[in-house]
Amino acid sequence: MRMASGVLREALIDVDAIAENVRHLRRLTGVEVIAVVKAEGYGHGAASRGRRAAPRWREPYSASPTSTKRSPCGAEESARRSSRGCTLPVRRSPRPSARTSSSGSPTSTSCCVRGDAAQGDRPAAVHLKIETGLSRNGIAPADWRVVFSEAARLERIGRLRVVGLFSHLSNTSEADDRAALARFEEGVVLAAAAGLNPPLRHIAATHAAIALPEARLNAVRIGIGIYGISPFDDRSSADLGLRPAMTLRGAVAAVRRVPAGTGVSYGYAYRTETDTTLALVPLGYADGVPRQASGRGPVTINGRRFTVAGRIAMDQFVVDVGDHPVAVGDEAVLFGDPTLGVPSARDWADAADTIDYEIVTRIGARVPRREVGA
Ligand SMILES: Cc1ncc(COP(=O)(O)O)c(C=O)c1O
């Protein structure tokens, strides 16, 4: 297959696949799906993907049921987000407890819980994140009581609206996730006792949303699943009824016939065994193609699967295509939907000894994203 002339490299984003994945996950879980679009929509391009994934998408920051999960911000930024009708995640205690190492600096947490994010008559809508065992950034259990009662007070005076209570699982084992869930339920009870009844309670990301039905509560926060990638080691996207949305491809930039024994790319980590044809693909580690996958990453060109020959360089790599007919401008697919006969992001993750989350989110800004689908 030929690439359009003038296109060196691109990531095709199948917006129908994203919409279908969201519908599928909604049906499967039976609860509200909050689409996670951080890291530019896991590398897929945040705004347009979010709009497709979430009927209630708001720009430039999202509102439930889409979550940008951006970094903590100051009071001014919180107020700006709030004034746009966004819901804000509140992750840390307003004041550091003796048992936490929170800095107490004006993060989104402190300004929201103080109610600074409210704009005029409009209370800031927030999701409170509580720590249940991941040891990252939820409100520490020791602070639950004080934060909940302050949040309830701010609700009563119209400064805050707690629309969600949430946490995040470690996916270490089912037993660990169940223990975190039990801690979360304690948080729900304490919040209710303080007078908070957030309509949304969510703890499950893609893994638990599929594997641990009791963790679905009344909403799930799905990232990788909406982009059609499986979070399981032993279950593919197709096993889960999901379709990968991103296809990364480049146009063969040069072909060269070389004799046996020709060294290829830096360090001659690969030498041709016979007379053969080398095809140059204009994608490299500057585009997010992992150098660790040198000599291992798979590529499909004109219906045949090859392996990267030698080292992946900054802007390009070489494929030994043997006698397979390949011409300049032919499409080289690094990954996409494997049911269509191309490698998967998981294949690249395996080749680079990482996870497919990293493969898709690292695709660089100079690779244009082009939407395909309805
Ligand atoms: C707090 C939180 N929720 C949800 C997600 C989505 O996870 P997944 O992509 O596995 O669905 C993430 C991902 O990093 C996260 O940090």
Image (tube, rainbow, N blue to C red):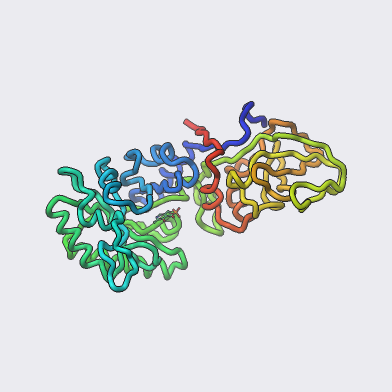
**Frontmost residue, 304 versus 276:** 276
Q: Residue furthest left?
A: 157
- Quadrant of the image for the N terminus? top right
Rendered residue at 49%/40% (across/down): 17
**Frontmost residue, 310 versus 3:** 310
Rendered residue at 44%/56% (across/down): 210
Q: Quadrant of residue 5?
A: top right
Q: Residue furthest top?
A: 5
Looking at the image, residue 142 sits to the left or right of residue 355; the answer is left
Q: Is residue 283 above or below residue 218?
A: above
Q: Can residue 204 be seen in the rendering of this structure?
A: yes
Residue 58 at what x, y percent from top left? 32, 39
Residue 155 at what x, y percent from top left? 16, 54
**Frontmost residue, 311 versus 107:** 107
Looking at the image, residue 252 sits to the left or right of residue 35; the answer is right
Residue 111 at what x, y percent from top left? 25, 54
Residue 286 at what x, y percent from top left? 60, 45
Q: Is residue 220 above or below residue 281?
A: below
Rendered residue at 74%/32% (across/down): 327
- Ligand 1 sits in which quadrant? bottom left
Q: Can residue 214 be seen in the rendering of this structure?
A: no
Looking at the image, residue 45 sits to the left or right of residue 164; the answer is right
